[in-house]
Image: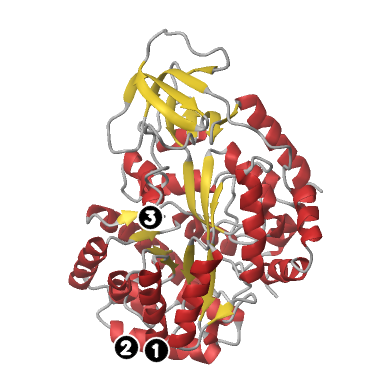
Amino acid sequence: MSTLCFYVNQIHENMKSKTTILAIFIAWAFFHPGTKAQDMAVVNVSVIDCTGSKEKPNMTVLVTDGKITAIEKFSRKNFGANTRIIDGKGKYLIPGLWDMHVHCLNDSLVFFPLMICNGITSVRDMYNNAALFEMKTEWRKLINEGKLIGPNMYIPLAVFGPDQNWWWGIVVKSKEEAANFVREAKASGADFIKIYDLYDPEVYFAIVNEAKQAGIKVVGHCPISVNIADAAEAGQSTFEHLLGILIASSSKETQIRSQMVQKTHEVHDSFSDLTRLLFYVQSADISGTYDVNKANNLFRRLKNSGSYQCPTLVFWKRLLTAINTDTCADGRFKDVPAKDLKYWYDLKADLSTAKISKEDFNLIRTLVKMDFQLVKELNRRGVKLLAGTDITWYKGKVMPKFGLHDELSLLVEAGLSPMEALLTATKNAAEALGVLDKAGTLEVGKCADMLLLDANPLKDIQNTTKINSVVKAGNYYSRDKLDNLLHDVEMKAKK
C-alpha cells in the first residue's frame, strides 16, 4: 500500500469520531486561543503590488481590522496609539504567496506553520473524499477563527471514474451520477471540483456542463480520453502538471490516445502500474511526434478559453532526484517528520513504488525537459500560469518550507520574468479561484496578507526567501516569531 493510501485509511477511520479530530489538532498543530488582527502601518517601504504596475518606492501601507485601508506616499504623520509601526526602509512588500497545488493530510498539519513561516498565506488543497472534506472544513474553520496558525484554505471534492477508484473516493459511472455529484458538491460548500484521469468522455462533459450551470469550478488533470483544448473550451478552468498537452500536440494524437485508454483500462487494478502509465511514463511516442503547428493551435485555444496551467515543475525535478538517489542527504529535510524521512530513505522508485526502470527514467528526463519548453511557450503565447508544488510529505521530496520558492525559481528558469513568476503565485492564483476582488494583490479593501522581504524579488526571484516578516489577515509574524515557529516544527518532526 502506498504511503498516501496508508494516511487516507487512517483518516477514514479517524473520522468516525470528532474527538479524534481534535486530538489530531492538539498533537500536531499549533493550536492556540483566538487572535485579533492588529492595526498596523508598514512605512517607507517599496511596494510590489502584483497588479501589473511597477514597483512603488517610499510608500506607507495601512492595515485596519485585517484589511488594507490605504497605500500612499510615505509621510511622517501620526498614527493611532494602538497602531503597530513596521519600518520598511530598504525592504519590499509583496502579497502573501499562494501554493495552488497542495495535499494536506493527517500529520501534514505541521505544514501549516511552515507555510506561514515561508510567506505562503493561501493554499489550494487538491484532494478530498467525503471524510477528508469534513475534516479539512474543521481545519479551515479553526484557521479562520484564529485558533490555528495556517494559510487560507480552498478545498474541493474529488471525483473519479470507475477505472480509477482511489483512496475511498467518490465515483461516478454515468451522466446522471455525474450531475448528482456536482449538485451535492455545490451544496456541501466545496470551493471547486477536482477531476482525475479516467472517465468516459460523456461522463466527463456531464460533470463540466453541470458544474457550469451550478456555478462551481472544475479543476485538475486532463482526462486521457479528452483533448485538453476541448476540455478547456467546455469549461474546466485549471489543468495540473501539463498533463494532456504533449498528447494533444502529437501528430499521432488519435493513435496514442486510443492506446493509452486501452492500456489504462487493462492495468486499472494496479495502483503502481496505473500511476506509472498516467503520470510518469505515458508513451515514448509522445516525445518524438511533437507537431509545432498543432501545438501553436492548441496554445491559441487554451489562451482564448481563459484556462490556467499549473505546471508543478518542482515536483517533476524532485521526482528525478527521488528516483535517481538512495538517500536524502539534504540539510533542508530537518523539518520532515521522522517516519516520513525514513520512507524517503527507503525510496528507490517513485512515490507510489511504481515500476520505474532505467529506460523509464531516461524517458521521464526527456519529458521533463520538454515541460520546461512548454512553460516557455505557454507563457509566450499568453496562457496564464499558476505556481503549485503538488506538495505533501509522502511524495517526491518536495518540501513545504522551500517548494514554492523553488517553483518560482524554476518558472524563471523556464523563461518567465521575476514579475511574471510572482503573478503565478499571487494575482493569477486569486483570479483562478474567483477571489481576486478580495485577495491576490496589494490594493485598498483587500485582505492584508503580505510578505515583507529584505531584498527585491524583481532583481532575483530567490529573494522571495529573504523574509523579514509575514502578515496574515492582519496578524503580524515578526522574524523572531517565525524563527520560534520553525524551531517548534523541527522539534515536532523529530518525535
The circle drawn on residue 432 is 3
Q: Which of the two marks, 1 or 3, is nearer to us in this view?
A: 3
Amino acid type, mark 2: Gln
**Badge 1 vs badge 3, beta-carbon distance below 8 Å:** no
SS state under label 3: helix
Residue at (38, 48) in percent of width and height: 424
- Write down the quadrant of residue 155 in the picture: bottom right
Q: Which residue is mark 2?
A: 255
Q: Is residue 441 left or right of residue 140?
A: left
Q: Please provide percent x and percent y for residue 64.
A: 49, 27
**Badge 1 vs badge 2, beta-carbon distance below 8 Å:** yes
| Among numbered discs 1 and 3, the one appearing first in the sequence | 1
How crowded pointer 2 is (Cα within 10 Å; few <14, some 14-19, many 20+) is rated as: few
Residue at (48, 26) in percent of width and height: 63
How crowded pointer 1 is (Cα within 10 Å; few <14, some 14-19, many 20+) is rated as: few
Residue at (28, 53) in percent of width and height: 379
The circle drawn on residue 259 is 1
Nearest to the observer: residue 261 or residue 41: 41
Nearest to the observer: residue 456 or residue 396: 456
Amino acid type, mark 1: Gln
Amino acid type, mark 3: Ala
- Mark pair 1, 3: CA separation: 33 Å
Q: Quadrant of the N terminus?
A: bottom right
